[in-house]
Amino acid sequence: MLLSIEHQTRYVYSEPVNYTIQQLRLTPQNGFGQHVKRWEIKVNGELHPSADAYGNSIHTLVVDVSHEEIVVVASGEIETGLEVISQHQALPLPIYLRDTALTVSDEKIYAFANQFKRPAHLQNQALEEMMHALLEKVSYIKGVTEVTTSAIEAFKLGQGVCQDHAHVFIACCRSIGLPARYVSGYLFTEDGSLMQTHAWGDVFLEAEGWQSFDVSNGCRAGASHVRLATGLDYRTASPVSGMRSGGGLEGMTTSVIVNQSGLPISRQYRIDQTALFKQAESIRQAQQAQQ
């Protein structure tokens, strides 16, 4: 499958920003059944390419002149569903058994996961069963969690989004001794729904290597998925992270379009410029009210 992708993010500020630095994990790489046909990132600032410890391709964005907005557009074409699945491993596997604040487990998560602990030759199927059981346990509900919500909190709440599902799945795997990692990327759907960044989990099995599970959709990650970055959790694999000096209040709008090349775009989510300017004006008014 050949997928065309456009991911646009725009930040606006109530006051001029003196300095911005961001890390962009917005560049997919070859491997795991995908091949990058073309890809580019356009920004109103300087980009410095490098690689991080997890083997991700990253760009550091630096804007060191006064600015009131930042626009980042990543786009290109990715061929997916290829038979050759790379199992390249940048770090030793024990790293992916390490707990983080977002993926640490507790007694309830361990008890849930331990039901699906099997001998090595049966573990793959057991994890698929765990994926479906987890989706029943933690319903997909938007707006009830944040990027700082931990696996323990989401599991207790019983609600969350793809990021939470990935964190809980990783916590379950690590609690029973299976190396697991967070994956950020995109998902293609024929009806044009879920036009947003996506997340799922990888788990390493001795007999099969890395296996990918998309808990939110109750399926294995495959030809409809495009991988951007991997890490121990959201914080180490998020598409954009950074800091700034100045700027007052911040407004952010994003749009993602994922379409099968050669077919009409079934649904598009583009930035509403009018809504963005209204958002910018509202944060300026809020800033003035605080003064």
Image (spheres, rainbow, N blue to C red):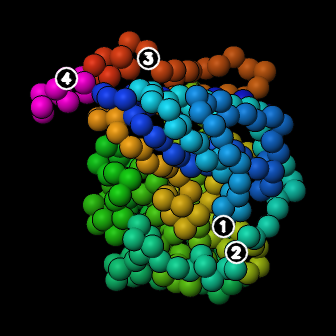
Note whether 75 is above or below 29 in the view shown. above
Q: Going 12% across and 28% down the picture, which residue do you hit?
A: 289
Q: Which residue, given by chain and number where applicable, does mark 1 sit on? A: 53
Mark in front: 4 vs 2: 4
Mark toward the viewer: 4 or 3: 4
Q: Is residue 144 above or below residue 94?
A: above
Which residue lies at the image location 53% right of the left edge and 75% below the top edge? 173
Secondary structure category for the residue under label 3: loop
Viewer-closest of 181 and 253: 253
The picture quadrant where one finds residue 183 is bottom right
Percent across and percent down for residue 77 are 77, 33
The residue type indicated by label 1 comes to: Ala
Mark 4–mark 3 Cα distance, whole angstroms, equals: 20 Å
What is the distance, in whole Å, between disc 1 and disc 2 at their CAs? 7 Å
Question: Is disc 2 surrounded by few (<14), some (14 to 19) or many (20+) residues within 10 Å?
Answer: few
Q: Which residues are magenta?
A: 282-291
Q: Which mark sits nearer the N-terminus, 4 or 2?
A: 2
Q: Is residue 116 visible?
A: no
Q: Check disc 4 and give the amino acid type.
A: Gln
On the image, numbered disc 3 is attached to which residue? 272
Q: Secondary structure at mark 1?
A: loop
CB-based contact (under 8 Å), mark 4 and mark 2: no
Q: Which residue is mark 2?
A: 91
Q: Amino acid at mark 3?
A: Asp
Q: Are marks 3 and 2 in contact (CB under 8 Å)?
A: no
Please check the rendered image and state whether residue 290 is part of the magenta-colored stretch, yes or no. Answer: yes
